[in-house]
Amino acid sequence: MARRSILGGLLTVTTAAAAVAGVCYLFKEEIKETKTYKDLDEKYDVDKKIKEYSKKAKDTAYDLKDKAKVAAKDIKTKADEWKASNDDTIFEDDEIIIDGDSSEERDYVSILADDENAAEEAKEAVADKTEEVKDAVADKVEEVKEEAVDKVEDIKEMVADKAEDIKDIAENTENIEMD
């Protein structure tokens, strides 16, 4: 009955995926030594691409984190200035530096409502690029996972055949009479 419900089906799929992942982990060195894995890795450079995309994602995340910290400090400083001021036009020319070291290379984001769209667009562009990288990595991981599942099935069949051979040998040795 549990398998017929959505939660039971989800539990079944999750358990199966965990079992396959566990078997793949146990046999990861053997899988990496197989011709199929080597051919796929040679053809698609799966390991290299996973490392490359992972590094890009981490670098982007760290850069965005650092920029956010700097921007937060700048905003806090500006907020203190704004609190101390009684001038209504204090927001006219204020800008917060988001990126770059020299004034020629800096990107400025105005804190006025008109320029909030530019900041939102930049944020969306980063989110889109991150999603593209994540999708590419997920696709490559899925391809490797499918190959690993196939290889695990082959290994299971080979192990079953070997176990059957050992069982036959054991039965034959019991039937041999010692003189």
Image (cartoon, grey):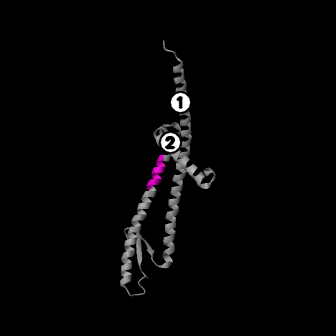
Question: To which residue does mark 1 refer?
Answer: 163
Measuring from the top left, give residue 62's x and y in whole percent. Answer: 41, 61
Of the residues shown, which amino acid type is indicated by label 1?
Ala
Q: Is residue 144 magenta?
A: no
Which SS type dominates the magenta stretch? Answer: helix
- Would you place residue 48 above or below residue 94 in this image? above
Q: Residue at the far front: name it.
A: 1
Q: Pointer 1 and pointer 2: residues touching (CB < 8 Å)?
A: no
Q: Report the magenta residues as a range.
A: 47-55
Residue at 50% of width from left, 72% of height from top? 118
Mark 1 or mark 2: whose residue is earlier in sequence: 2
Residue at horizontal 46 percent and vertical 39 percent from the top: 29
Residue 140 x/y as whole percent: 53, 49
Q: Which mark is residue 97?
A: none
| Label 1 residue SS | helix
Query: Residue visible at 41% across and 74% down?
Result: 96
Residue placed under numbered mark 2 in the picture: 23
* Residue type, numbered disc 2: Val
Secondary element under disc 2, as helix, strand or loop, is helix
Q: Residue placed at 53% from the left, 30% from the top? A: 163
Are there few (<14), some (14-19), or many (20+) residues within 10 Å of tag 1? few
